[in-house]
Image: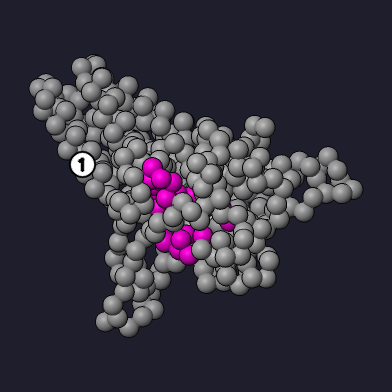
């Protein structure tokens, strides 16, 4: 069945007249909906490093438009080797922003291949088309994942998610939240068709996701925006809910999937997968093609980003620990494929333990 879900949320706006991409400031949400236009490669790179834009597919899309912005700046250079070198130097700046999500490198490599093909064109418009293709293909892949995921999971009441794998993290419906949106839409449709025996609507447990609080700030905001029932919990509540049989399934996104289907995702995902396994609860990962690493054999090879310890010691700039306390901020962890029930992709369902 095709996806029927829709979302009003999108982190990107393109202004054709000024040829400028604006991104919603994900650090200001949910308090303020503030849009930031990006004009040069350094602004693009800072937006990714500082997590003004975040989420694996969204980072890739942003980097693609950053690459195009570099091309527009350098296109007039007569010497084609120098022109290519300048643009590829900007590509390196964009690639150095965050190490874990493979979508970033996938998008930049795709732009570099387009550059190679179109280096002698009169204008860089083919590169703008490539950046839009990367965005629009992501929208399409989100819809396909939503449909496959809703088919596989079926009607469900309580689902738990971690971090933000929603519209804000992608170009479309989201990965994990795309599936949730689709289940919600199908259950709403069934309720209309059977008003005397309506199925219970889906309810989402939202992990707050320390330390960046993507769950509390972004996922709760998105779900409420689309009228999907949700309840925010602290990360350490999940085990209790599972023990109380209040979680029917868990669904998360991914930042990189190795060849053996080990999954890197937001820190805390691995703990959830262990809990799900212990409580015999299905654990789903939803990910587009751009999240599958074509090279790395296992999750052990995935580079795990470590961010500033200050991000653990402060909330909204406010110090919550002794100033001289040591802290560690691992941004991601790796869930072994043995703990994953199924990976939902645009092309169907992968069951890592049945291959
Ligand atoms: O550090 P972030 O906010 O970029 O991490 C995001 C995640 O871990 C998401 O779960 C992942 O990118 C999947 S998004 C569709």
Using the image as rendered, state which of residue 265 and residue 274 is in the foreground.
274
Q: Is residue 173 visible?
A: no
Q: Is residue 310 magenta?
A: no
Using the image as rendered, state which of residue 91 and residue 75 is in the foreground.
91
Q: Is residue 257 magenta?
A: yes
Q: Is residue 62 left or right of residue 43?
A: right
Taking the spot 71% from the left edge, 42% from the top edge, the residue there is 186
Quadrant in which the N terminus is drawn = top right
Q: Is residue 170 visible?
A: yes
Q: Position of residue 265 (x, y in %)?
A: 43, 54
Taking the spot 86% from the left edge, 43% from the top edge, the residue there is 194
Taking the spot 26% from the left edge, 30% from the top edge, the residue there is 112
Q: Position of residue 59 (x, y in %)?
A: 37, 44
**Quadrant of the image occupied by residue 75:** top left
Stretch in magenta: 250-273
Q: Is residue 69 above or below residue 254?
A: above
Q: Position of residue 92 (x, y in %)?
A: 21, 41
Residue named by callout 1: 92
Taking the spot 26% from the left edge, 40% from the top edge, the residue there is 40
Q: Is residue 341 left or right of residue 37?
A: right
């Amino acid at each position: 069945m095709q996806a029927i879900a829709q979302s009003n949320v999108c982190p990107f706006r393109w202004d054709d007249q000024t040829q400028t991409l604006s991104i919603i400031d994900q650090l200001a949400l949910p308090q303020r909906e503030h849009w930031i236009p990006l004009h040069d490669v350094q602004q693009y790179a800072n937006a990714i490093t500082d997590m003004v834009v975040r989420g694996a597919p969204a980072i890739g899309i942003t980097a693609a438009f950053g690459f195009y912005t570099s091309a527009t700046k350098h296109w007039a250079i007569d010497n084609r080797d120098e022109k290519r070198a300048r643009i590829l130097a900007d590509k390196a700046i964009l690639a150095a922003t965050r190490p874990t999500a493979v979508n970033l490198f996938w998008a930049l490599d795709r732009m570099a291949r387009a550059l190679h093909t179109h280096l002698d064109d009169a204008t860089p418009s083919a590169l703008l088309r490539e950046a839009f293709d990367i965005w629009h293909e992501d929208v399409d892949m989100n819809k396909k994942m939503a449909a496959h995921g809703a088919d596989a999971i079926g009607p469900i009441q309580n689902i738990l998610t971690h971090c933000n794998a929603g519209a804000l993290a992608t170009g479309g419906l989201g990965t994990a939240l795309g599936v949730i949106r689709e289940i919600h839409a199908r259950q709403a449709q069934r309720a209309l068709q059977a008003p005397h025996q309506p199925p219970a609507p889906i309810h989402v447990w939202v992990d707050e996701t320390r330390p960046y609080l993507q769950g509390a700030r972004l996922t709760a905001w998105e779900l409420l925006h689309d009228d999907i029932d949700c309840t925010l919990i602290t990360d350490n509540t999940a085990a209790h809910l599972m023990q109380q049989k209040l979680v029917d399934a868990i669904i998360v996104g991914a930042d990189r999937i190795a060849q053996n289907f080990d999954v890197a995702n937001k820190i805390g995902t691995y703990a959830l997968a262990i809990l799900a396994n212990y409580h015999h609860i299905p654990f789903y990962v939803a990910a587009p093609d751009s999240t599958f690493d074509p090279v790395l054999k296992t999750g052990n090879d995935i580079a795990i980003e470590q961010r500033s310890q200050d991000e653990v010691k402060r909330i909204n700039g406010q110090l919550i620990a002794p100033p001289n306390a040591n802290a560690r901020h691992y941004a991601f962890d790796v869930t072994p494929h043995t703990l994953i029930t199924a990976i939902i992709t645009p092309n169907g369902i992968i069951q890592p333990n049945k291959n």
